[in-house]
Amino acid sequence: MYCNACGKAIVDDGRFCSYCGNVVGNPPIAKKLIRSRVDRKIAGVCSGLAHYLDLDVSLVRILWFFITFISGVLPGIVAYLLGWIIIPEEPELKPVVSAHQPITT
Ligand SMILES: [Zn+2]
């Protein structure tokens, strides 16, 4: 990878150029805990959590079921309902055409 500002070779996963301090690559996107619209079984709470925590959705669901049952079912259901109420739903996806797609080859 090369710095956009000074053109020097820099490490591929670097966020800043070590020569000029220019921000390179894709800026880290602030993660938001949202409920997924597309990947959901009930209300998207588990998949929202999975995306937020960078975990597999199935793993989060299995964990949720496991924790729910060892905690006497009700706490898990209450937690899920709270997540459903508190966690905002992912905004509806609209096709976005960007003229500034980063070139990733
Ligand atoms: Zn640079």
Image: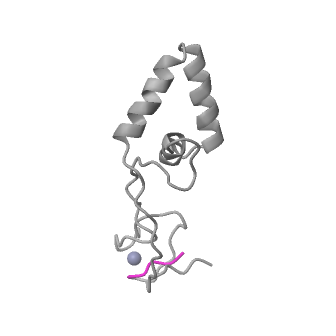
* Residue 56 seen: no
Picture layout, residue 47 above or below residue 97? above
Based on the picture, tell me whether residue 2 belongs to the magenta stretch: yes
Q: Quadrant of residue 58?
A: top right
Picture layout, residue 61 above or below residue 51? above
Residue at 54% across / 18% down in the picture?
73
Residue farthest toward the bottom in the current orientation of the protein:
99
Marks counted in the figure total 0
Side of 15 relative to 20 (left or right): right
Give the position of the N terminus as an image quadrant: bottom right
Picture layout, residue 35 above or below residue 96? above
Residue at 49% across / 51% down in the picture?
36
Give the position of the C terminus as an image quadrant: bottom right
Residue 59 is situated, as x and y percent measured from the top left of the image, at: 64, 37
- The span picked out in magenta is 1-5
Nearest the eye: 18 or 40: 40
Residue 85 is situated, as x and y percent measured from the top left of the image, at: 36, 38
Which quadrant of the render holds ligand 1? bottom left
Q: Quadrant of residue 27?
A: bottom left
Residue 51 is situated, as x and y percent measured from the top left of the image, at: 52, 48
Residue 37 is situated, as x and y percent measured from the top left of the image, at: 50, 54
Nearest the eye: 19 or 37: 37
Q: Main secondary structure of the magenta part?
A: loop
Based on the picture, tell me whether residue 45 belongs to the magenta stretch: no
Specify the color scheme. Answer: one colour
Picture layout, residue 4 above or below residue 34? below
* Residue 6 seen: yes
Residue at 54% across / 43% down in the picture?
50
Residue at 52% across / 63% down in the picture?
13
